[in-house]
Image: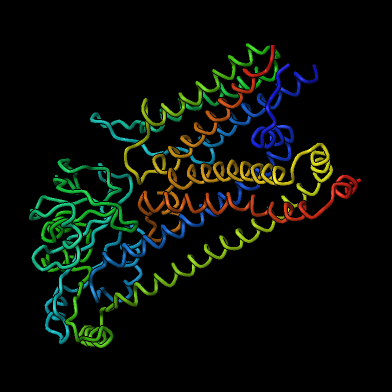
Amino acid sequence: MNHKKLTVFTLAFENIKRNRFRSVWLVILVAVFAFAIFCGTVLTGSLDNGIKTMAGRVGADLMVVAQGYEVDLEDTLLRSEPSTFYLDGEVLEGVRGIAGVEEASSQLFIASLDADCCTVPVQLIGYDPESDFTIKNWLVNVWDGALGQDDIVVGSLILAEPGDQLVFFNKVYNVVAKLDDTGMGFDSSIFMNRHAAQVMIADSGRLSADELKHRDDLTSAVMVKLSKDADAQEVAAAIQAEYPQTDAVVSSDFMRDIASRLTDISKLTIGITVLLWVVAVMVLFFVFSIVMDSRKKELGLLIALGATRKKLARIMLLESFVITLLGAICGIFAACLILFPFQTLIAGMLELPYLLPSAQVIFAYMMLSLGVTVAIGPISSLSFIRKLSKTDVYSLIKEND
Amino acid sequence: MDGQKRLKYPAGIAVVIFGVLLLLLLLVIVPVCDGQVETASGSFIPMKCHWMSQAVLLFACLLILLGILLMASAGRETRLMLLIVTAACAVCVLLLVTALIGVCGSPTMRCNYATKPALQVFSVVLLVFSGASIINVARKKK
């Protein structure tokens, strides 16, 4: 006959094994809450990371677009929805002459047709390397050469690597660099020399307005950097007074608007996470208490047979620790199976800047969720253990009868 | 006999459910891209995710068959072998999606951001299930 030494560990593990039904349900319960807590934390962190990255990448104090195209600009920057909209090229020079404007640079947006890299149209952004002060600041992280007429820089979601060639409107372009993830529209965008973009429009014959088609000063947006003492609202009003056919979008307002929507979503996510957390603690507390309570007779008999209350307390703590640890690991593993492989799908469904935090931050979230979830079991058991130490053996054995 | 019945049905039913789920994933929930690519000769052929999908559909049918066989078989060795084949199916699906055929290259395409991760997760879950079932059956006394 196989005899096992009755240690705290063997007793705790045997208890878990023998009461399989109870143990499995407790593990599932803990797993559900660990899943919710970890998912909520990572989602909130990714949205926060996305908005921070976006704020750093817009780079201009004001953005001037044709009247009524503010939504298209947001679509281009945020959701990678390709847009083609134009304003009169003379606006650029005019804006440069307005008081309070330190620098101004134009950008040209083109929605491509199908290309080798993509089955959906992509956003082509033409910028002027000479006057640009927005794109080159973060482009320099991946590439610091001069952008030639046939050179393009691709976003992280474009299927091309540096050295590859892509064809747009029957013209071959060389990919010179690939950007890191940004969590925003830039990931599906392609950057090129503004003049090359201008030529592309002329070649494509996509514009119906012939008088625009052959102009070489076409502009989709004018990015404006203000001097230090300038007031963004005043300069925006001055631009709109001068050019009534335009909308001057103040970046901070634009960003604030997006940020406030994101904050609402973040608050909701945090709220749900906190609610789940509270529910988790309460449910687990009651479940563990009920489970422990139903075992009074068993524990009373063990005390009568010579087991010390201290030893029983350790068995109870170990049991609840093992159950919550197993549950937390299962829950976090399930969350990883959803969050990481489906990150592009999640980002697309949210239609918001969604950028996963670094591996270290995710690991910290994981440890936090694991630690907090694992702590629930033993903490929930403590009140019963305290009760156990104060109740006499006879009452323990008789109470459930 | 009752004990044997209790043991054999859940695993078999679960494998059938896995097979049906795989069918649903590919046909309804996260189907692959429906576009076609133009060849140099000017004809249109389906993209490679289509061929991957066809191959995986065969494995879905195979899983349903394995599940039925698992329900019908009582012998420990037979069940063990069937579960090993189930685990092999999970590995094959994973390899078909990632290495052997794969999906379209662009991360913006549906097969890349939806079908591929769904099948990867499916394979991992099926592999974990088969592994646990194999251990469970292997530990049972003859």
* Residue A381 percent location from the top left of the image: 69, 51
Residue pictured at 61% horizontal, 41% vertical: A322
Q: Quadrant of residue A199?
A: bottom left
* Residue A8 percent location from the top left of the image: 66, 37
Observer-nearest residue: A4 or B34?
Answer: A4
Q: Quadrant of residue A216?
A: bottom left
* Residue B41 percent location from the top left of the image: 24, 29
Q: Does the image show residue A35?
A: yes
Observer-nearest residue: A234 or B36?
Answer: A234
Q: Is residue A246 above or below residue B121?
A: below
Horizontally, residue A151 falls left or right of residue B55, namely left
Observer-nearest residue: A108 or A272?
Answer: A272
Horizontally, residue A350 falls left or right of residue A175, namely right
In the rendered image, which quarter contains the C terminus of chain A?
Answer: top right
* Residue B9 percent location from the top left of the image: 71, 24
Q: Does the image show residue A64?
A: no
In the rendered image, which quarter contains the N terminus of chain A?
Answer: top right
Residue pictured at 36% horizontal, 60% vertical: A50
Horizontally, residue A185 falls left or right of residue B132, namely left
Residue pictured at 62% horizontal, 48% vertical: A30
Residue pictured at 68% horizontal, 54% vertical: A382
Observer-nearest residue: B132 or A352?
Answer: B132
Q: Is residue B70 above or below residue A237?
A: above
